[in-house]
Amino acid sequence: MAGESMIPNKGISEEELFTELEKRLKIDLTFDSGKILGSMCTYPHPLAQKIIQKYIDRNLGDPGLHRGSKEIEEEAVQMLGELLHLKRAYGNIVSGGTEANVLAVRAFRNVSNVEKPELILPESAHFSFLKASDLLKVKLVWADLNRDYSVNVKDVESKITDNTIGIVGIAGTTGLGVVDDIPALSDIAVDYGIPLHIDAAFGGFVIPFAKALGYELPDFDFKLKGVQSITIDPHKMGMAPIPAGGIVFRKKKYMDAINVLAPYLAGGKIFQATITGTRLGANAIAVWALFKHLGFEGYKNVVKEAMENALWFAEQIKRLDRVYLIREPMLNIVSFGSKRLKKIEAELKARGWGISAHRGYIRIVMMPHVKREHLMNFLKDLREILRRV
Ligand SMILES: Cc1ncc(COP(=O)(O)O)c(C=O)c1O
């Protein structure tokens, strides 16, 4: 009723509360419904849920109070580093790929002595770099893509100026899961003495395991000398609960360049590099626990199913009329286009599918919650829709 306070004077019981929440949240799509096919998030691993419940109060913004949690976060960052072929890693478990990318740009800008900083990045880069640009006053210089949607390395090189503070390569683009020619980008970075940041927010928890399974993918990590920082998100293919992103730097100087003194915390003075102050410790603990519990083999099995689903689904799309594959999948993302995309999108949404069309295609992300039967149900609906559009 208009004018009535939303805050009750006398609180309602837990039972009433959950009854209302269940009713209200029914409209949310859930991952276990099998209907969410266009998200890079997934149902968190059950172990992670236990961890969150138990350690929900840990605050990594005040690590003097929660020293054990801070040690665990540092080990989680080391494990990310190990996965990415780095012996000694510097970084944090952060709120997601956006924060990780912002931190990398901030570090590159701060270590450079450039008055009008510019960052060269592929046209396929995630919109988080727009936020970084706005926040940090760094001009974005967009590099063209090749016909296969990877960045055109020659174009990147041609755009280097005295103002360039860094180059971005992508290991798993948001739209198509494309991995750029990062060895070539690294060579340029070394030649020109410019740091290279890799946005592996999605691909970071896929490529190492896919390579171990025998899939041929370019090197993308700290094996390559030019790579100075990597975004890698546990809350995507790492199956950690939201929010859990990862930023890993090769050198301490990048962390030093973004550390801010927090002088008044209950646990004592510390330096914070993250954008967030108060931040969940439980999620960093969950990242650590999942590495220990699943091990390399556990993650490899998750990626095996996801890659097999992607290749299978791509073949099914090729057999359909009126839709076409945008490109052969490199990772576990399959995107298809159509002349009638808007109509197809609307009809799929009306049938409850969690997908979206963007840049002229619909992308299906084979997350761990996406099973073959869900894809079969989707294809059944798609075939029916295609007969009518
Ligand atoms: C390649 C890439 N980078 C960064 C991000 C941003 O991650 P987040 O939404 O966790 O901030 C995404 C999200 O989809 C992404 O695909």
Image (cartoon, rainbow, N blue to C red):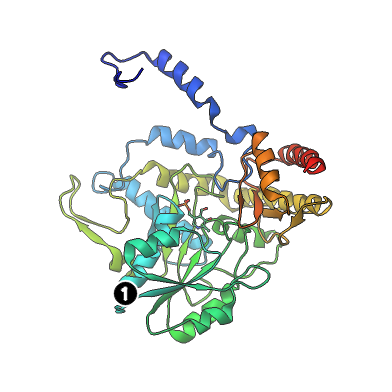
Image coordinates for residue 186, horizontal then vertical, percent: 52, 77
Is residue 77 visible in this depiction of the protein?
no
Q: In screen coordinates, is 88 left or right of 346?
A: left
Image coordinates for residue 370, horizontal then vertical, percent: 66, 41
Disc 1 secondary structure class: helix
In the depicted structure, whether residue 99 falls above or below residue 156: above
| Front residue of this view, candidates 310 and 92 | 310
Q: In screen coordinates, is 25 left or right of 317?
A: left
Q: Residue furthest left?
A: 264
Q: Which residue is found at the position 68% from the left and 69% from the top?
A: 148
In the depicted structure, whether residue 109 falls above or below residue 234: below
| Front residue of this view, candidates 262 and 63 | 262
Q: Residue 177's quadrant in the figure? A: bottom right
Image coordinates for residue 341, horizontal then vertical, percent: 69, 50
Quarter containing the N terminus: top left
Residue placed under numbered mark 1 in the picture: 111
Image coordinates for residue 99, horizontal then vertical, percent: 39, 55
Mark 1 Cα within 10 Å, few/some/many (few <14, many 20+)? some
Q: In screen coordinates, is 196 left or right of 209?
A: left
In the depicted structure, whether residue 329 falls above or below residue 58: below
Residue type, numbered disc 1:
Val
Q: Which residue is found at the position 44% from the left and 37% from the top?
A: 51
Q: Which residue is found at the position 70% from the left and 48% from the top?
A: 305
Q: Which residue is found at the position 50% from the left and 20% from the top?
A: 23
